[in-house]
Image (cartoon, coloured by chain):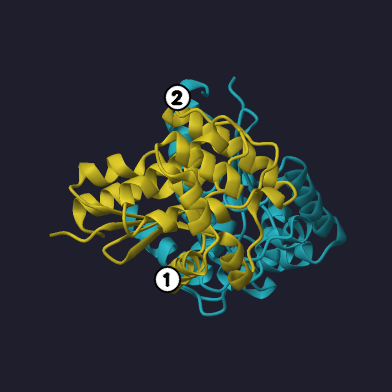
Chain colours: A yellow, B cyan
Amino acid sequence: MAARIEFFCEFASPYGYLAATRIDALAARHGRALAFRPVLLGPIFRRTGAIPLVEMPIKGDYVARDVARAARAIGEPLGWPAGQPTTGLYAARGFYALLPDDPAAARALYMACYRRYWVEAIESASAGAVAEMAETLELDGAKLLAAMGSDAVKQRVRDANDAALAKGVFGSPFVIVDGEPFWGFDRFGEVERWLETGGW
Amino acid sequence: MAARIEFFCEFASPYGYLAATRIDALAARHGRALAFRPVLLGPIFRRTGAIPLVEMPIKGDYVARDVARAARAIGEPLGWPAGQPTTGLYAARGFYALLPDDPAAARALYMACYRRYWVEAIESASAGAVAEMAETLELDGAKLLAAMGSDAVKQRVRDANDAALAKGVFGSPFVIVDGEPFWGFDRFGEVERWLETGGW
């Protein structure tokens, strides 16, 4: 069986959000399973020396324009939250709390928070907001909140981040296909071509 | 008559080089004239706080791989000069020395240096190397060398860089179509679509 496509995204990354809305269909078109893995770029940026795009003079303005243009190009609604950039810490903890027992619920929760933030521009990144979102998905919010505060889940988030960094992940979105790394939603065309042809 | 496409590139940028090999055909397909404008990212990066990609841990390794993949994807030969990143100062001075009187020669000289550096991986960025390259194009190398050292040409390079920065140029390649900015060779598909549709 062909290897899973590995997909990494950061909560505060609008390109990551747009890519997350498209990665399932992409994987399905090529008969591949998907490993969806949220990452926290904060600790990763401290290793690479990168600066969050939107915080850079001149470039930040361009990025806001480019993101809106990319969203319109694929017909995906996108807001621009006032508090940007936010932290993806609690959405990631919620995700990794659920992942071992119920990957589908983990993904649904993360995407619901992601969508609420990037489409409705509503704050969805606090622990309380993530637990509330879990309730709307018929998950146990109180139990999730407790898990999100546990050392075991905190460690799971750190381990996932370290694993991503060890694979060379330094930005969002980031896709790995059969060991080949692709950074950016703008590489999805190349990802498709790589899957079709086996590489060039 | 439709406005010119404005194209900006930095000598040390391999994505800029790849884009420069394709921008004329792109403009021609859409019946647009082209304003080809080399820039120096050093002074621009000091304004935006950016770090040269190849100098960043982890990300730099990815970029080298991505550039080679992008070159293979379009069938364009590409080397990887040992001294990377270099300075585009003298190639830019040679270009802007020739531009007012002979834009075609300016472009030919810059592209010849660009190609020598990025394809043959031969040092072509010093004043002497630029003047030698001019001789191979049947231009007066000694005259060009003198012009490259003149205050007038130095100022012309600074003015061109300031003009680019004023238009929001912060990276290489950078294309402006009817006021719409596109950063990166990976945006050429969108540039084409923008030219075809008038925007979205």
Q: Position of residue A137 (x, y in %)?
A: 41, 36
Q: Is residue B112 visible?
A: yes
Q: Position of residue A32 (x, y in %)?
A: 21, 51
Tags 1 and 2 in contact by the CB under 8 Å rule?
A: no
What residue is at 48 percent from the left and 58 percent from the top? A147
Q: Secondary structure at mark 1?
A: helix
Q: Are marks 1 and 2 on the same chain?
A: no
Q: Is residue B67 left or right of residue A67?
A: left
Q: Is residue A98 left or right of residue B92?
A: left
Q: Amino acid at mark 2?
A: Glu
Q: Position of residue A30 (x, y in %)?
A: 20, 47
Q: Nearer the viewer, residue B140 or A49?
A: A49
What residue is at 42 percent from the left and 71 percent from the top? A163
Position of residue B42 relative to residue A78, above or below, is below
Position of residue A57 relative to residue B56, above or below, is above
> In which chain is the residue bearing label 2?
B
Q: Is residue A8 left or right of residue A125?
A: left
> In which chain is the residue bearing label 1?
A
| Residue under pointer 2 | B196
What residue is at 53 percent from the left and 45 percent from the top? A130
Q: Nearer the viewer, residue B43 or A40?
A: A40
Mark 1 or 2: in front is 1
| Residue under pointer 1 | A163
What residue is at 66 percent from the left and 60 percent from the top? A51
